[in-house]
Image (cartoon, rainbow, N blue to C red):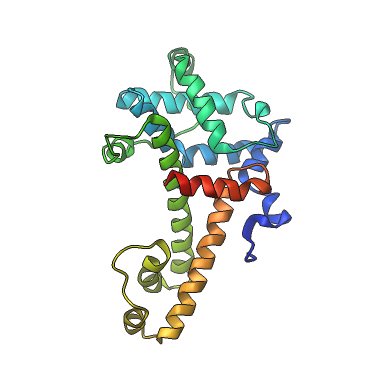
Amino acid sequence: MSPDGPRGGARFATTQWSIVVAAAQGDDTAGRDALAALCKRYWYPLYAFARRRGAGEHAAQDLVQGFFALVLEKDYIAAVDRDRGRFRSFLMAAFTNYTSNEREKAGAQKRGGDQTVLSLNMSKGEEWYALEPADYQTPERIFERRWALTVLDKVLAELRAEFVASGKSRFFAALLPYVVGGSPLPSYREAGETLRMTEGAVKVAVHRMRRRYRDLLRAAVADTVSDAAQVDDELQHLINAL
């Protein structure tokens, strides 16, 4: 990938949310698969939102599952303005409307039986929710923060996978603190002694790892907007949410 990451037209043309928005006008299997993948990745922010609004564990699971089933069955995406299409905003607005109208009750009856439109593993939902701060966060703020953290988790998983695939797991573990921050950080000299590298080589390696992290982050954000011009604004929103 080029240093500019998803800014390039060829890269952006294949982002998931762009595929989803384009598929809204027709029967596009790739678009539906991309939408299903996004739903599976970002279910927890909605689960936390529902729990913070007062839904119980199982009710929140039913809400999220029912909502995604409805999204995949109905022509929800056709209503998204391509010039302003952000998957985060779409999810928040559509899910809020869904829960406010208590459509989960009718949806639960319609879904019935063993038919499952989208299989979600939400077994960790309550465990994660138990770690959420119980004081100042509104349902909206907890959604935004969890959305941002989900994006960052995806990026770190991709970065780790790249290093593991090249046989550099130990290298990744040693340099990761310089990318994600933390305190106290070891000196470059100390890292060099651990990795048997010079201090200068460690500095170069950290610079490259940070650049790759930024590229992956931009790509992850681009997957959730319908216009490349929105990437910088969405990145800033992610930072603010954290």
Above or below — where is 116 with respect to 175? Answer: above
Q: Position of residue 154 (x, y in %)?
A: 46, 52
Above or below — where is 174 with respect to 232? Answer: below
Q: Where is residue 191 in the image (x, y as percent from the top left)?
A: 34, 78
Residue at the image point whose x is 26% and y is 37% from the top: 130
Q: Which quadrant of the view contains residue 81?
A: top right
Left or right: residue 157 compared with residue 87: left
Left or right: residue 153 compared with residue 34: left
Left or right: residue 32 compared with residue 148: right
**Residue 236 visible within the image:** yes
Q: Position of residue 123 (x, y in %)?
A: 33, 37
Residue at the image point whose x is 58% and y is 54% from the top: 219
Left or right: residue 231 compared with residue 152: right
Residue at the image point whose x is 40% and y is 24% from the top: 62
Name the residue nearer the viewer: 203 or 125: 203
**Residue 222 visible within the image:** no
Q: Which quadrant of the view contains residue 26?
A: top right
Q: Where is residue 106 in the image (x, y as percent from the top left)?
A: 47, 12
Quadrant (top left/top right/bottom left/bottom right) for the N terminus: bottom right
